[in-house]
Image (tube, rainbow, N blue to C red):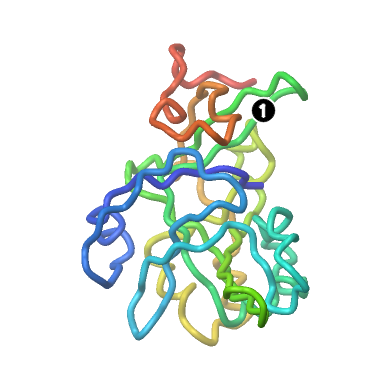
C-alpha cells in the first residue's frame, strides 16, 4: 500500500515535470501527508493539465457520506477496473499525483522501521491516481483521490510487498487521455523498474502525523540500511 507520501517540490519543479498550466504560485511544503489530508493532484481541466488540491481517500459519487475515505486511499491495479468504488473514476477521472517520495514500514508490530522511498533520478514520482467529486444537497462538494498500487519490484519487496504505480514521463499523456481502453491500461499497470527507486531508513518521527517537517525525510545516521 501507500499510506504516507511527501510533496515539497517547488512550482517550477512540478511545472517542468508535468507541464502544468496556470500561473506560478507558492506551494506549501508537505513532508508527511497522511490519509484524508489535502494533497496536490494533476488533472485535465479546460484543455490543460492543472494542479489542484484534493482530499486523499476516494469517496465515490454514490456514497451516502464521506466516512469511507480513510479506507479508500489506495486502489489495487489488479482489481481497479472491477471494483464499483473505482470503476467509473478509472474510465473517466484519471489523474497523476506528483510526489518527492513515499514511506513504508518494515519489521514486526510495535518495532517497525520506517523507510523513505524516493526517485533514483532525483526528479519526482508521478503516481497513477483516480479522482471523484461527491455532492450531496446539504453538503459542500467534496473532491477526493486515490493512489493506484501494484506489486513491489524486487528491490522494494525487501521493505514492503506493494508500491504505488509509478508512471514514466512518456506515459503521462497516455494515462490521462480520454477513452483509454482496458487493454491499453494493462500496459501501464505495472511495477516500476528497480533502478527507478532508492530508499533509506528515516526517523520514527514520521509515524506521528503531526510531524510534518524536513526531519521526516532525513536519513538515519547509518544511511541506507542493508536488508537481508
SS at mark 1?
A: strand
150, above or below 203, in the image: below
Circle 1 residues within 10 Å: few <14, some 14–19, many ≥20: some
18, above or below 107, in the image: below
Q: Quadrant of the C terminus?
A: top right
Image coords of residue 225 (percent x, y): 53, 19
Q: How many marks?
A: 1
Q: Which residue is mark 1?
A: 106
- Residue 159 in sight here: yes
Q: Residue at x 50, y 33 (%)?
A: 116
Image coords of residue 52 (percent x, y): 41, 66
Is 124 in front, or is 134?
134
Image coords of residue 40 (percent x, y): 43, 58
Q: Residue at x 51, y 55 (%)?
A: 38
Q: Quadrant of residue 129?
A: bottom right
Determine whether, in the image, residue 169 is placed left or right of residue 68.
left
- Residue 155 in sight here: no
Q: Quadrant of residue 165?
A: bottom right
Is 139 in front, or is 12?
139
135, above or below 228, in the image: below
Amino acid at each position: 500500500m501507500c499510506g504516507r507520501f511527501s510533496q515539497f517540490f517547488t512550482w517550477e519543479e512540478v511545472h517542468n515535470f508535468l507541464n502544468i498550466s496556470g500561473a506560478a504560485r507558492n506551494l506549501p511544503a508537505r513532508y508527511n501527508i497522511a490519509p484524508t489530508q489535502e494533497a496536490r493532484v494533476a488533472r485535465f481541466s479546460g484543455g490543460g493539465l492543472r494542479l489542484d488540491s484534493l482530499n486523499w481517500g476516494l469517496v465515490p459519487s454514490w456514497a451516502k457520506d464521506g466516512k469511507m475515505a480513510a479506507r479508500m486511499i489506495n486502489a489495487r491495479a489488479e482489481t481497479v477496473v472491477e471494483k464499483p468504488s473505482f470503476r467509473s473514476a478509472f474510465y473517466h477521472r484519471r489523474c497523476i499525483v506528483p510526489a518527492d517520495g513515499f514511506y513504508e514500514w518494515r519489521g514486526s508490530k510495535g518495532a517497525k522501521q520506517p523507510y523513505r522511498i524516493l526517485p533514483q533520478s532525483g526528479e519526482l514520482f508521478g503516481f497513477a491516481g483516480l479522482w471523484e467529486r461527491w455532492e450531496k444537497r446539504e453538503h459542500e462538494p467534496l473532491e477526493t483521490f486515490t493512489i493506484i498500487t501494484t506489486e513491489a519490484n524486487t528491490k522494494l519487496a525487501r521493505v514492503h510487498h506493494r508500491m504505488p504505480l509509478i508512471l514514466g514521463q512518456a506515459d503521462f499523456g497516455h494515462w490521462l487521455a480520454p477513452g483509454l481502453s482496458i487493454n491499453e491500461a494493462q500496459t501501464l499497470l505495472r511495477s516500476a523498474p528497480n533502478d527507478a527507486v532508492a530508499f533509506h531508513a528515516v526517523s520514527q518521527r514520521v509515524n506521528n502525523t503531526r510531524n510534518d517537517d524536513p526531519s521526516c525525510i532525513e536519513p538515519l545516521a547509518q544511511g541506507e540500511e542493508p536488508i537481508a
